[in-house]
Structures are given as C-alpha cells and as structure tokens.
Amino acid sequence: MKKVLGCILAVSMVMGLAACQGGGNSSTAAADQTDGAVAEAEGSAGAAPELVIQLGHIDPSTNDPYQLLAEHFADKMSELSGGKIQIDILSDAQLGSEASMIEGMKLGTIDCAIISNFSYSTSIPEFAAFDLPYIFTSEEQAHAVMDDEEITGDLIQQLYDEYDVKILAYGEGGFRSVINTKKPIVSPADFTSMKIRVPGNETYLATFTAFGSNPVSMASSECYTGLQQGTIDGLEQPIGPMYSYKSYEVCKYVSLTEHIYNPISLTVSRSLWENLSEEEQGWFEEAAAYARDTQRAEMPELNERLLQAMVDEKGLEINEIEDKTAFREVVQPVYDSFIAANGQERLDKIEALTETIE
C-alpha cells in the first residue's frame, strides 16, 4: 500500500502532461478497434453457445474486484470451450444477496456465483478463521493460505457436501479499510462513538466493537443514503467497493486500517457441476484458476487507480497507518471467542504458513 500512496502525486502530474500531449492518433486507433470488433463478431456469429450459465455477484459492474474476477472467468471459459459455454454476468445483486445465492445454488436454481468468504461462516463457523482481523498482513500471505488445500480443503468439502456449493478458486477481494465523513483514523481511540457500517457477520461486529465504534449492520444499497443522512458515519470496505458503490462521493477520509482481508470465492452449484462432462469440468477449473491468477495480478493497479480517482474527483484525504500494533492488540477478544468455539488447530496452521511469507 505504500507504493499506492507514493504514486498518487506522480500520477496526477503525469495525467496533466498527458492531457497536453495526447490525441494525435485517436481516430486511427478507434478505427482499428472497430474493425477488430466487427471481425470478431463476424467470426463468432455462426456458432451459438450450447450452454448459457448465469454468474451472479452483489457488487457493481465497473471498477470492482468481483466484476473483474467474473469477466476473466467468462472470457477464459469462452476461449477454452470454443464458444460452446457462455457465462452471463449478473452484477448488482440481480440474483439476490449472497445468502440468497448460496440457497439458490443448493436448490439448483442458480448456476454460479462469486461469494465473500464471510457469507459461509454463519453456516460453517470455521470459515471465520480467514476473516479474523489482522490474521494476514499481506496479500501474498492471504493467497498462500486460501490456496493451501491442507488449510482450506476440509471446509471446502464440507460446503460442497452440506450446501451443494463448490468453490473453484479464491480471488482477491482486497484488504478492508475505513472510509468516513468525520476524521482520519490513526488509532483505535478515533473510533469512539463512531457509527460504522459492517456486514451482518459476527466477526465483523465483534471487531468493530473491539475497536470502540458502534457497528451498524445495514444493506449495501442503503449505505450511500445512510452516509448522507448521518445514520452512519462511515463504513469499512475494500478500496474497489469504496469507489464502485460511490461511498467516496459523500465521505472525506480514507484510513488504510487494512483490518480484515476479504477472500472472494468463485463457485458453482453441485447440480450444474455434476451434470458437466469431465472435459467441461476441466474447462471450469482451468478458467477459474486463470481468473484467480489474472485478477490477483491486476488488483494492485486497480486499487492505485481508484485511490487516485477518489483524490482527483472529490479531494478525499487518505492516510496510511504505519504501526497497526494498537489495532491488533484491541481485537484479541475476537480471537479468544473464535478459539473457544472452534479450537486452535486451524489458526496454528495459518500462522505456520504466514510466518514464512512477508
């Protein structure tokens, strides 16, 4: 994240220079793109897909990590299947909430979805291990853990056995930070009496209670109005949703608390999976792995660009928190509660792996 903040001023200067110099070959470039698009359309017009699959997620359709993961999956699936399988992306909760999509996959009425990890922990509490505050201090640590079958495999199998949801791969949701209307957050004391919107999830509620705030559970669609009306003072989100949900339009401060990492899973229903041929299942797995790796690689640039946009468009103040020790100390009760309910073994495995990665 230091690289992100360090680039903000430089990007602003470069954008100004580019505005003076650009535009020389735009007509030619546009014509080339149009010709390419027409050729592509003509080449594929004769072959209708044999299978059309809907993939739902709750986030907006632009400048968002969920959408980015979905698009890479859809594009790769079309390539691998030679156009036989088409993935239609339904963003903005068109298929309902994440809980509704999980239920729909169990019933066989929803094919695929991108689901936040915390949506599983209500039914399978040990999934909350990956949502504990500050359990990861880098994206590299999170990727290694979420891709480690020894750590996640039994939970993924339990989800399939009991809820008919198959996780194909974990994409990058990003670290969650705080955006608010009141002041920069530099220590837990700054949260005192602040009304912070969090997902309706036990770990998130406990974390922000430990920080000293008044956590409020509210639907994502209501947050913009809630910020305008003062029903909430702020919310915690990854950088992508801060922009795609337009929270930045009615807030003044972004504090990079990076308190919880947000794994997002690319999933398919059991009813669809078990009706695919072995070759088709291979396409799904390969497309999911490609989408995971490609989306993860693109996320740093996306976050940098969106932070810069928030500064340029609305003048938001962004502060990094160099020393998060105080934040880590106050959330220890969240760990104590998890261990009391689920034991220590999975946390020990996570720690053993993350200690080898910066």
Image (cartoon, rainbow, N blue to C red):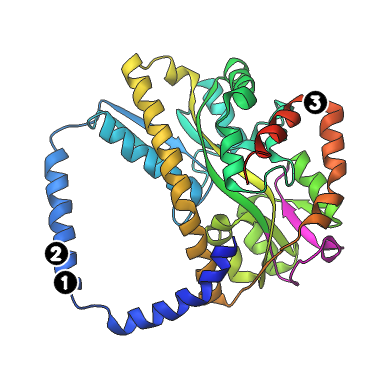
Nearer to me, 320 or 215: 320
Q: Amino acid at mark 2?
A: Ala
Asked if residue 90 shows in the view, the reply is no
Q: Is residue 186 magenta?
A: yes
Which quadrant of the figure has residue 152?
Answer: top right
Q: Secondary structure at mark 1?
A: helix
Q: Position of residue 250 (x, y in %)?
A: 63, 70
User: What percent of the width, then of the height, locates residue 187?
Assistant: 81, 63
Image mark for residue 340:
none
Disc 1 to disc 2, C-alpha distance: 6 Å
Q: Position of residue 2 (x, y in %)?
A: 60, 64
Q: Would residue 330 be counted in the magenta stretch?
A: no
> Quadrant location of residue 237?
bottom right
The one nearer the camera, 221 or 140, is 140
Q: Disc 2 and disc 3: Cα gap in Å? A: 60 Å
The residue sitting at 38% across, 20% down in the picture is 281
User: What segment carries the magenta color?
Assistant: 178-200
Q: In this figure, which residue is indicated by the disc labeled 1?
A: 27
**For the residue carrying disc 3, how many other residues have a C-alpha within 10 Å: few (<14), some (14-19), or many (20+)?**
some
* Residue 67 x/y as whole percent: 45, 47
Mark 3 / mark 1, whichever is N-terminal: 1
Label 1 close to label 2 by CB (< 8 Å):
yes
Number of labelled discs?
3
Which residue in the protein does label 3 denote? 342
